[in-house]
Image (cartoon, grey):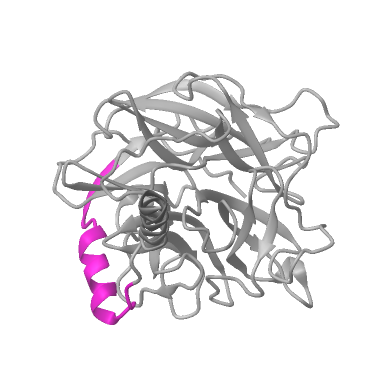
Amino acid sequence: MKIKYLIVAISALAITSCATKYKKREITDSVMQEIYEEIKTPYKYGLVMVPTDNSYKMDCPSVFRKDGKWYMTYLIYDGRGYETWLAESDNLLDWKHLGKVMSFSENEKHWDVNQKAGYISLQDLTWGGSYEWEKYDDKYWMSYFGGDSKGYEAGVLSIGMAYTKEAPTKPHEFQRLENPVLTPKDKDAKWWDNSTMYKNSVIRDKDKVTGHNFIMYYNARGDSINPAKGAERIAMAVSNDMKTWKRYGDKPLINHHIGISGDAYIQRINDTWVMFYFGAFWSGWNQGAFNRFAVSNDLVNWTDWKGDDLVKSSEPYDDLFAHKSFVVKHDGVVYHFYCAVNKAEQRGIAIATSKDLGKSKLNFVAPPEKKKK
């Protein structure tokens, strides 16, 4: 009997330990300032990925690590739509293109024939951790937004899921679920996502705060009166199997009521959850697009940072937009990857850092000449 009671006691202790793995902190002004001091990157290293000519643009980096190397998935827009590509690096600064992981479809009947904008799912979220791309069901997963219209984020965009059992460090086509998992046309579509949907980021809910295994943070445009004229906000969806998703909650998580709040990326920093995201065209902001953050102790309720932007336009290569964060800490240095867009509308990937690492020698090619009127 003593052994039985001991087993019960150990089991109860294990359950308690699991439930309190993540301690809740009151999100005070001092906590917000502490996080800012930890993640700020005042030194702009510059461009690290640029198009070789002006026929296409680069966007939306997602960075992971495997077998001592760094890898990046990123988007290329060539006038038709988005495709998802892969690159590798030894040092986070010098990158080599490898190839595609999601391409345009040959079958015109595919719902995502002309748009496949992918983002890695289920990454190790520990600040300064492994940044490994973790598996579920023996697969590596990507969430993505897709559509059948040609053009820059054109038409009605929906969210899909893709996966592979092969090494994600080698360029190859990911397999995609046949149908989207969330669309603006769903019967349960909300007022904030009833027009079109954009970037999505999927994490594990290890403590099942939401009662589910997985959380998707996504941004979408919508409105209760005029969906196409609505603002873009960040919201949540949940799943237990990565295939069936449902919206969570009765309001968006990040909502500035005007312009764009989008491209959430989550990290676990100092016993708090930190959401990196970008804003654009807000009331009272002079910048076009800029990177911000919010903090949470439960993955659901978020406190917005009120201080300085993490990254904003300041250089010739990002003087139009400096936005769309992906942030990692490695060997004591914070690397803030972002999409840099200049006034010639050339678009590439740049880095700001917490330590002065010098300046990149990479530049955009000569900008396209403006057509004479």
Q: Is residue 117 left or right of residue 14?
A: right
Q: Is residue 1 visible?
A: yes
Residue lying at 61% horizontally and 26% vertically, measured from the top left:
174
Q: Is residue 323 visible?
A: no
Residue 162 x/y as whole percent: 64, 34
Q: Is residue 281 left or right of residue 4?
A: right
Q: Is residue 259 left or right of residue 343?
A: right
Dividing the picture into quadrants, the one containing residue 360 is top left
Residue 310 in the image: above or below residue 159: below
Dividing the picture into quadrants, the one containing residue 51 is top left
Residue lying at 32% horizontally and 23% vertically, measured from the top left:
67
Residue 235 x/y as whole percent: 59, 64
Task: Tell me how many marks there are.
Answer: 0
Residue 84 x/y as whole percent: 56, 32
Looking at the picture, tell me which residue is in the foreground, 187 or 338: 187
Looking at the picture, tell me which residue is in the foreground, 303 or 309: 303
Q: Is residue 237 left or right of residue 352?
A: right
Q: Magenta span has 298? A: no
Chain part drawn in magenta: 25-46
Residue lying at 30% horizontally and 45% vertically, measured from the top left:
351
